[in-house]
Amino acid sequence: MRYLLRRVGFFLLTLWAALTLNFFLPHFMPGSPINTLRAQTKGRVSDAQLTEILTSFGYKPHENIVQQYFNYLGNMVTGNWGVSLGSSLGTPVSKLIGEALPWTLGLVGITTVLAFLLGSLVGTIAAWRRGGVVDSVLPSVFVVTSALPYFVVGLFLILFLTVDNTWLPSSGNYDTSIVPGFSPGFIGSVLKYAALPALTLLITSIGGWVLTMRNNMITTLAEDYIRMGRAKGLSDRKVMLNYAARNAFLPNLSGFAMSIGFVLTGAILVEKIFNYPGLGYQLYNAVQSIDYPMMQTLFMLFTVAVLGALLICDLVTVWLDPRTRAKG
Amino acid sequence: MTTLTSADSAAGPEAPVGPPTAGRRRSRASVWRAFLSNRKANVGFGMFFVLLVMAVFPSLFTSVSDPTAPARFTPRLTPSGAHWFGTTSLGQDIWALFVYGAREPLIIAVVAGGLATIVSVLVGVSAAYLGGIPDDVISFITNVVLVIPTFPLVIVLSAYAGKPTLTIMVAVLVVTGWSYGANQMRAQALSLRNRDFLESARVRGERRSYIIVFEMLPTMISLIIANFLGAALYSVLAAAGLQFLGLGDPNSDSWGTMLYWADSQSALESGTAWWAILPAIGIAVLGVAFALMNYAFDEISNPALRPVRRQRVKKLGTRRRPTRTPATLGGGAGNE
């Protein structure tokens, strides 16, 4: 119990630290948002209006910074995230994020889980058949793929797998000539458009899991209880999965949680290459148009996602691993 | 960034810790020997060396001396004897851009990776050495930096900084890249703290700074190198990603910037595909070089991971080795 409370405490403290960082960064950076905005809107919007827009997302240079800070914290928590200053000037940030979120959740969520499970399986087999074909070839291959940048893999997939943009499309999230809805045509189109971005994320993220799992397995296989399992005459499969993999898997869980953050990171580049309208693409656009409210909110959401995943994994680990319970 | 980092040597005595002086010198030599005899390390180092030569002596590879100058040649030439990989739609020689573009990524890798490693060592070792409340505070800060998603932070930071210069970019990469190593260094230093040879140094009455620098650090050398390789890899990929997104100096000559221009001029669709392919290969090769050397260091510091033909399977049961190679930079380490 004390362990859990400590984890929740860490979650809250870290979240607060990230939010604080997020607030103070723009205040201490060179350049003034009002000048940037003036240059960007090229006189189409009057200074008074500019100030009003900036005020609406919490930029009040004349107000007490402490008060601003607390207002900001309140707004972040209540979802009052201001309006976008980007191409869709004036649209509430929360609305734009609501539109983009499902696409990223689908793409990143599914590929992360898939990479984790597939990678762990391959790693298990590689370590189990030490010295076999899988074990001698794959580690090198995966060291290489996991060092490839997302955008390099994406570029090469576009180069080799998109033929006239009809077989596997390289841009967008679904065929716009199809009316969205729960029709087979639309779902098929969504899957087809997600194929290349998903493949890019899969190729670059699976290697890490294979190597981690292989290394954990090798450690676990040296344990006495594995010998005991063998000595008891259990089938190889049972020893491999129930005795070794089960225990080698646990330390990976928190890595899995962290990796959600890294896949989100990759999603920024992948979504940009494939013009996939998720959160990563939003962040790219926000940076291009110096959309501070959007940037701040997205950064906050990415942090919450990683922290939340970590917390959930801690809970799951406590549930699965009696040793952590004993510690607390 | 998907990065391989060295085995988490938190709980095990696997680092080459020898008795004072003579033994430690020997262990350092054996790290070097192991590195030389490791095939992954050789391949990685070979790749790195070729790029290094290209970055230091670009004039050996191309006769064009100012590759970024626009409109020097006819735009969109197809590959030929005069222009091996054609020209860009801005009239630059693609091969020359590529050759000169090797410099910046290498500088970023070495400088940002090196600085991040130095910060990791300083923070990690001092946390372990000070102990008590200072350790708690330092560890908490390290863990916070560790779990905050780095790349979005880098993007936001660079956006606030305007188009960042090389110095700012390196600074941003160091600020976001030290935490993982610091955690590892702290763990390693903690496990060293009460070893006999440090105890004897303390009894001899050596100063703290002397003990840390001359007694402790030499025993951590393989972990430090592995960390540097990991940090360098992270820096290469993050910097290239930033430049690709247009968050670098658009006038600089580097592979990331080259990709940015290629992408914004639709190089793949407009017949100048090499404009995008060459820098992509360059970044990939540099990244792979660091990753291979890094993995080789994992194998050196944790013999159980080595390819089996050098070590019999039967031997596996001899010793318990807690290993965790996080899948990603910082992966799995934020859990304490």
Image (tube, helix red, strand yellow):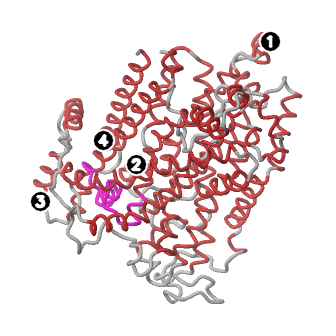
* Residue at the image point whose x is 76% and y is 41% from the top: B300
Q: Which amino acid type is shown beneath numbered disc 1?
A: Arg
Q: Chain of mark 1?
A: B
Disc 4 marks a residue whose amino acid type is His
- Residue assigned mark 2: B152
Give the residue displayed 53% in from the left and 89% down from the top: B77
Disc 4 is placed on an element classified as: helix
Could you say which is closer to the camera, residue A221 or residue B262? A221
Q: Which mark is residue A27?
A: 4
Q: In this figure, which residue is indicated by the disc labeled 3? A: A46
Magenta stretch, main secondary structure, is: helix
Identified by mark 2, the residue type is Pro
Q: Which residue is mark 1?
A: B204
Residue A103 figure quarter:
bottom left
Instruction: Report how far apart the C-alphas of labels 3 and 4 lie in the structure.
Output: 23 Å
Which mark, by number, is residue B313? none
- Percent x, y for residue B277? 55, 73
Distance from disc 4 to disc 2, alpha carbons, whole Å, reads 18 Å
Q: CA distance from mark 1 to mark 2?
A: 49 Å
